[in-house]
Amino acid sequence: TARLGVIGDPIEHSKSPDIHAAFGRQLGIELDYQKFRVTAPELTRFLSEFFAGGGRGLNVTVPHKESVYEWVGAHSDAARVAGACNTLIAESGGVSGDNTDGAGLVLDLRRLGTTLSGARVLVLGAGGAARGAMGPLLAENPACLQVCNRTQARAETLIAQCGGQLWQPGEAAFDLVIGASSAGLSAQSVTLPAGAVDSNTLVYDMIYGAEPTALMRAGVDAGAGAVADGLGMLVGQAAEAFERWFGQLPDAGPVLEQLRRSL
Ligand code: ATR
């Protein structure tokens, strides 16, 4: 039985154990996936003991994604660009770190029928969530990938490091607008950049919930053709992590449906 888990603080509400248990059943792989509340001072000791004890891999969530990046011996390109890891993998030579958030986003956009190649894409936000998405989005060859952030200097830094262009007022509408700002977590309403949305636009929020998110509501008000929340991205990043551990990519669809009903 493969020993796996997710570490974070807080961790109580993590859906990862349910998601990975469902993937294991789907593919007939036996696994023991636990959630572990690990505080910052406990982090390195926990990691050493978990992997010394034969652990196969870990998912990592807030507030440890950047710290584990420093701890692991090797990084994927995605982890390097993000400067953060959400997935750790036990290898013969040590523990390597990957970041599957961006790949999970792309997987979910594909599930929704989005064609990224040649698309005009706008990312809202320039923090950690946006950073993780830039590389995987650019790899799909969009016509353009623009960034709009409350603090313009932070958007410029992100673009200098990850690519893309700064959104400017007067830009034409986008095929895809991706919410990667934490504004929607606290704000009752969020504003979309002027003219960014038309009836062909998919407004995709990385945040999810039982009810439509503030960005999804703003998208509907602006006449977006479709809106979606980030629950599928959560399942997608998990599917990509599972693939790193076991070499098989689970089907996210049925697990997503099950999770949606439980919200
Ligand atoms: P995360 O890891 O979730 O991306 P982060 O790195 O702290 O978190 O980044 C938060 C992002 O949400 C930033 O782009 C931030 O904008 P600033 O760079 O201007 O701070 C954005 N954000 C947070 N609260 C916001 C708000 N009320 N309105 C607009 N943007 C907000």
Image (spheres, helix red, strand yellow):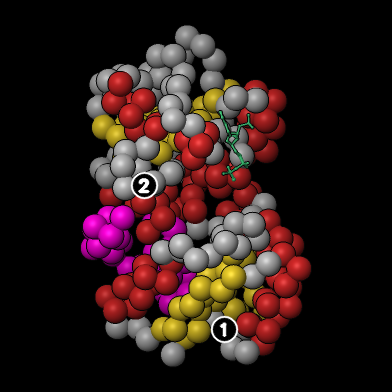
Tell me: 208 left or right of 135. Answer: left
Q: Position of residue 106 (x, y in %)?
A: 40, 48
Crowding near pointer 2: few (<14 within 10 Å), some, many (20+)?
few
Q: Quadrant of the N terminus?
A: bottom left
Q: Does the stretch in magenta take in 87?
A: no
Q: CA distance from mark 2 to mark 1?
A: 32 Å
As drawn, 57 above or below 214: below
Is label 2 in a helix, a strand or a loop? loop
Residue nearer the viewer, 207 or 56: 207
Residue nearer the viewer, 234 or 114: 234
Q: Amino acid at mark 1?
A: Gly
Q: Quadrant of the C terminus?
A: bottom left
Q: Position of residue 34 (x, y in %)?
A: 48, 77
Tell me: 202 left or right of 133. Answer: left
Name which residue lies at 63% across and 49% down: 81
Q: Amino acid at mark 2?
A: Gly
